[in-house]
Amino acid sequence: MTRKNMFILALIILLGFTLIACSNELALNIRYGIQALYYHLIGFDEPLPGFFALDAARAVFRLAISRYPDDIEPLVLMGMSYRITGDYHTAISYFLSALEVKPEEEWIYALIGECYLYLDEVDKASDAYYKAIETEEQARALYGLGVISFNKEGYSETIDYMTKALEIAPDLYDARIYLGKSLFFIDDLDKALEELDLAYRINSQKGEVQYYLGKIYEQKGESEKAKHFFERAMELED
């Protein structure tokens, strides 16, 4: 499962817990949709001819939307189901519909920002991320703003955004990688090594982390360590 889908799965599980606050009937109606979406994400439906978990999930969410127009959970989950398949415009439309129902749920703007970022519509992504943090900082929105800054070579801004994101969500793995890379690019090698070494200990199979560790050790003059990490990075790319 890709890291992006792991995040989506985590969000789906979190939304599942929010159903406790919903009516029992609503919870019952979309619980099966969440289960079907989970089966799709883990590939459970692939070996089962005639079982289309994603279609089943969307059918349940669509029914819940029509029956419970004042609840945002079915709308958000429907949006997530389209985001999974890369239909980001449709996903955005459902997220916006959820915000029409409950404008105070500003965290949904972070989901919209991510969709725009995948579409390479950077200005719209930035606008959505900023809306997500207008009243309260959101880790995913801060992370997204950090990615945008990194792609523009704004490494100091990236460091600020990723540091804040990690203060809120210390397990946001990719934020730590961007933080380490940004520290490397401003020549703060010791701090870069600290962050990327931690990322390496969390996941030693990430080629990008191995490569930048090699670059750091190369600049530090530790050629044997640099060689080791460059070789590992090449192996993992294969």
Image: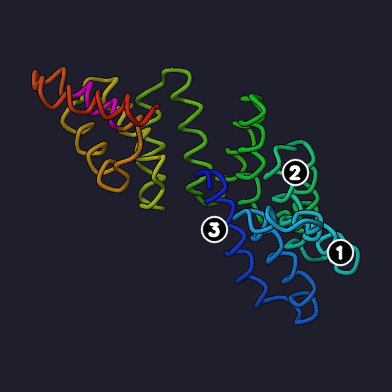
Q: Which residue is mark 3?
A: 10
SS at mark 2?
helix
| Mark-to-mark CA distance, 2 and 3 | 17 Å
In the foreground, 164 or 204: 204
Q: Nearer the viewer, mark 1 or mark 3?
A: 3
Q: Relative to 15, say whether 212 is above or below.
A: above
Residue 232 in picture, x, y percent from top left: 26, 29
Left or right of 67? Residue 134 is left
Residue 145 in picture, x, y percent from top left: 50, 33
Q: If the image is split into quadrants, where does the C terminus sit?
A: top left
Q: Relative to 21, say whether 61 is above or below.
A: above
Q: Earlier in the sequence, mark 1 or mark 2?
A: 1
Q: Which residue is mark 2?
A: 91
Q: Which residues are magenta?
A: 210-216
Q: Relative to 20, say whether 206 is above or below.
A: above
Left or right of 109? Residue 133 is left
Q: Which residue is mark 1?
A: 69
Q: Which mark is residue 12?
A: none
Q: Earlier in the sequence, mark 1 or mark 3?
A: 3
Q: Earlier in the sequence, mark 2 or mark 3?
A: 3
Residue 185 in picture, x, y percent from top left: 29, 20
* Magenta-span inclusion, residue 213: yes
SS at mark 3?
helix
Disc 2 packing (10 Å; few <14; some 14–19; many ≥20)? many
- The three-letter amino acid code for the residue at tag 3 is Ala
Q: Residue at x 76, y 77 (%)?
A: 28
- The three-letter amino acid code for the residue at tag 1 is Pro
